[in-house]
Image (cartoon, rainbow, N blue to C red):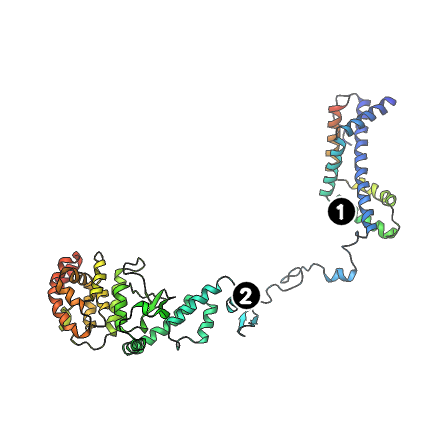
C-alpha cells in the first residue's frame, strides 16, 4: 500500500511539476464552458440560492449542492478526452 | 468504464486505472470549486441576478417573434410612406428622401456647394424671368441635368416663338455689336457654354468664329471650347452654324436664296483664320456661314451650301485674296460684294478642299 501511495504521490508530484495539471485544468474548464456545462451549473446555483436565501449563502453550501450534479453533467466526450490525456501522461512518465 | 489495453499486469492495470480516474475526479471537483467561488462572489457583490430584474420588466421586453414585426415589436417599414415637413422650405418630403433633401435645402453636405454653384451659373445665363423660385427648388431636389432639361425645354420654346427679334433686342441691350465672350463676364464666367438665345447675330457670329459653338443637348448652351475641341465633331459645328445663322438672319439684302445659291458665305478674316485651322476637317462650312451670320442675309441659301462649304471657306481664305477680301467684310450690305467675290473664290476653293468637297463643288457647278 505504501508503495501505491508512494507511487501516487510521485505521479501527482510529476503532474504538478511538469505543469500538466494546470494544462489539464484549463483544458477541462474550456471544454465545460464550451459545451454549456457552466451555464447549466449556474442556473442550478440560482435555484439553490433562491432556496437558501440570498444573504446566507456560503461557499460550502454551494459546493455541496453543486458537486454531485456537476460530476454527473460532464459530457462523455469531455470525460473521455481527459482520461485519455491522463493515461497518456502516466504512460509517458510513470515508472 | 472502458478498460484500455495496457501492457501492465491486471492489478497494476486496475490500480493505474483507478489512479487515472482519481486524477480526473480531482480535476472535475476543482472546476466545480472554481465555479462556486465565482458564483458566491457574484452573489455577495450583488451582480449575480442582474439580468433578472422583475417579472413585469421581463415580460415587457421579451423578444417578439411575430411576422411583420421585428424583435422589438416595431413594424419595420412603418415610415416608408410617410411624409415629413422640411423645416427650411416647409415642403412635404417623402421620408426616404428627407435626408438628401435636407442636405441640399440647408446647404450642408458634400454636394450642396457644387450644386449651388452650378445653379448659380445656369441662372446667370438665363434671363431672370425664366427662372423662378420653384425651378430653383426643384433643382435642389433633382439632378441638375433634369433641372437643366426643364430650363432647356423652356428655352427652346422661347426661341421658337420670337427668335430673330428677340435676339436682336437683347443684342442692343447688351451694348456693343459683336461683343466677344469676354465682354459679358457675368454671363459667361461660370458657364461651360453659352446660351445662344440671348445673343444677337453679330455676337453669335463672332462667337462662332472663335469657338466650337456646338449646342449641348441637355444644357442648350454653346460649347466655348476651341474650334478643334475634341468633344464635338465638325459635323456638329457645321450643323450649329446652320441652325444659328440660318433661321435667325433677318431679311437678306440680297434676298434671293436662289440667286445666291452659288454664293458662299464669306466669313470674317477672323473666321477665315479660324477655318484655316480646320483645314483637315472637310465639313467646316457651317461655321463659316455661322460666323458671317450677322452680315449674311442668305442664311437660307447658305444652309445647303454650308454643308459643302467648310472647305470652301477654307479655300477662300487660303485660296486667294478674293475669297479673303470677301470674307473680310462682315456687314450685311456687303453680302452682295461678298457674293461677287465668292464666285471667283468658289472656283478656287476646290483646289484647296479635300477630295470630298471637290466632288460637292462639282455637283454645284
Residue A66 in the image: above or below residue B220: above
**Looking at the image, can residue B322 be seen?**
yes
Residue at 31 percent of width and 61 percent of height: B225
Q: Callout 2: helix, strand or loop?
A: helix
Residue at 42 percent of width and 69 percent of height: B120
Q: Callout 1: helix, strand or loop?
A: helix
Residue at 22 percent of width and 56 percent of height: B280
Seen in the image, is A30 located left or right of residue B43? Answer: left
Residue B122 in the image: above or below residue B4: below
Residue A46: x and y in percent read 81, 50
Seen in the image, is B322 located left or right of residue A82? Answer: left
Label 1 marks which chain's residue? A
* Cβ atoms at labels 1 and 2 below 8 Å apart: no
Residue B44: x and y in percent read 84, 50
Near-viewer residue (B85 or A69): B85
Q: Provide the residue designation for mark 2.
A: B99
Near-viewer residue (A36 or A10): A10
Residue A4 in the image: above or below residue B157: above
Where residue B16 sits, quadrant-wise, is: top right
Seen in the image, is B352 located left or right of residue A78? Answer: left
**Looking at the image, can residue B265 be seen?**
no
User: Where is the C terminus of chain A found, in terms of image quarters?
Assistant: top right
Label 2 marks which chain's residue? B
Where residue B146 sits, quadrant-wise, is: bottom left
Mark 1 or 2: in front is 2
Residue B276 in the image: above or below residue B195: above
Where residue B130 sits, quadrant-wise, is: bottom left
Residue B173: x and y in percent read 31, 77
Measure how far apart labels 1 and 2 are at the Cα level: 46 Å
Q: Provide the residue designation for mark 1.
A: A39
User: Where is the N terminus of chain A found, in terms of image quarters?
Assistant: top right
Residue B71: x and y in percent read 66, 59
Amino acid at each position: 500500500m505504501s508503495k501505491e501511495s508512494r507511487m501516487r504521490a510521485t505521479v501527482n508530484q510529476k503532474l504538478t511539476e511538469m505543469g500538466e495539471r494546470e494544462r489539464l485544468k484549463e483544458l477541462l474548464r474550456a471544454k465545460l464552458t464550451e459545451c454549456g456545462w457552466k451555464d447549466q451549473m449556474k442556473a442550478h446555483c440560482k435555484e439553490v440560492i433562491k432556496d437558501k436565501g440570498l444573504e446566507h449563502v456560503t461557499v460550502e453550501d454551494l459546493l455541496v449542492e453543486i458537486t454531485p450534479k456537476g460530476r454527473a453533467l460532464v459530457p462523455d466526450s469531455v470525460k473521455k478526452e481527459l482520461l485519455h490525456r491522463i493515461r497518456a501522461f502516466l504512460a509517458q512518465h510513470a515508472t | 468504464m472502458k478498460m484500455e489495453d495496457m501492457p501492465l499486469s491486471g492489478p497494476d492495470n486496475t490500480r493505474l486505472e483507478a489512479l487515472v480516474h482519481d486524477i480526473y475526479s480531482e480535476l472535475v471537483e476543482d472546476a466545480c470549486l472554481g465555479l462556486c467561488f465565482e458564483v458566491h462572489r457574484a452573489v455577495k457583490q450583488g451582480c449575480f441576478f442582474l439580468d433578472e430584474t422583475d417579472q413585469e420588466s421581463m415580460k415587457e421586453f421579451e423578444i417578439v417573434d411575430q411576422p411583420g414585426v421585428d424583435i422589438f415589436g416595431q413594424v419595420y417599414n412603418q415610415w416608408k410612406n410617410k411624409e415629413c415637413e422640411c423645416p427650411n422650405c416647409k415642403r412635404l418630403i417623402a421620408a426616404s428622401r428627407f435626408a438628401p433633401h435636407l442636405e441640399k435645402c440647408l446647404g450642408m453636405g458634400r454636394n450642396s456647394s457644387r450644386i449651388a454653384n452650378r445653379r448659380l451659373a445656369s441662372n446667370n445665363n438665363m434671363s431672370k424671368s425664366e427662372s423662378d423660385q420653384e425651378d430653383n427648388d426643384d433643382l435642389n431636389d433633382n439632378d441638375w441635368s433634369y433641372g437643366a432639361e426643364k430650363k432647356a425645354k423652356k428655352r427652346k420654346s422661347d426661341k421658337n416663338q420670337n427668335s430673330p427679334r428677340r435676339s436682336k433686342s437683347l443684342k442692343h441691350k447688351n451694348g456693343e455689336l459683336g461683343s466677344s465672350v469676354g465682354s459679358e463676364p457675368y454671363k459667361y464666367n461660370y458657364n461651360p457654354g453659352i446660351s445662344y438665345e440671348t445673343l444677337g447675330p453679330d455676337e453669335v457670329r463672332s462667337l462662332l468664329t472663335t469657338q466650337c459653338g456646338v449646342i449641348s443637348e441637355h444644357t442648350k448652351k454653346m460649347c466655348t471650347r476651341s474650334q478643334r475641341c475634341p468633344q464635338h465633331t465638325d459635323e456638329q459645328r457645321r450643323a450649329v452654324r446652320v441652325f444659328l445663322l440660318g433661321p435667325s438672319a433677318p431679311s437678306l439684302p440680297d434676298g434671293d436664296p436662289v440667286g445666291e445659291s452659288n454664293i458662299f458665305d464669306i466669313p470674317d478674316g477672323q473666321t477665315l483664320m479660324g477655318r484655316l485651322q480646320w483645314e483637315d476637317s472637310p465639313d467646316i462650312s457651317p461655321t463659316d456661314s455661322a460666323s458671317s451670320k450677322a452680315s449674311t442675309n442668305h442664311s437660307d441659301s447658305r444652309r445647303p451650301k454650308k454643308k459643302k462649304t467648310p472647305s470652301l471657306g477654307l479655300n477662300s481664305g487660303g485660296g486667294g485674296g478674293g475669297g479673303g477680301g470677301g470674307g473680310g467684310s462682315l456687314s450685311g450690305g456687303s453680302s452682295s460684294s461678298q457674293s461677287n467675290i465668292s464666285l471667283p473664290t468658289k472656283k478656287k476653293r476646290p483646289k484647296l478642299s479635300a477630295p470630298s468637297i471637290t466632288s460637292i463643288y462639282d455637283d454645284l457647278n
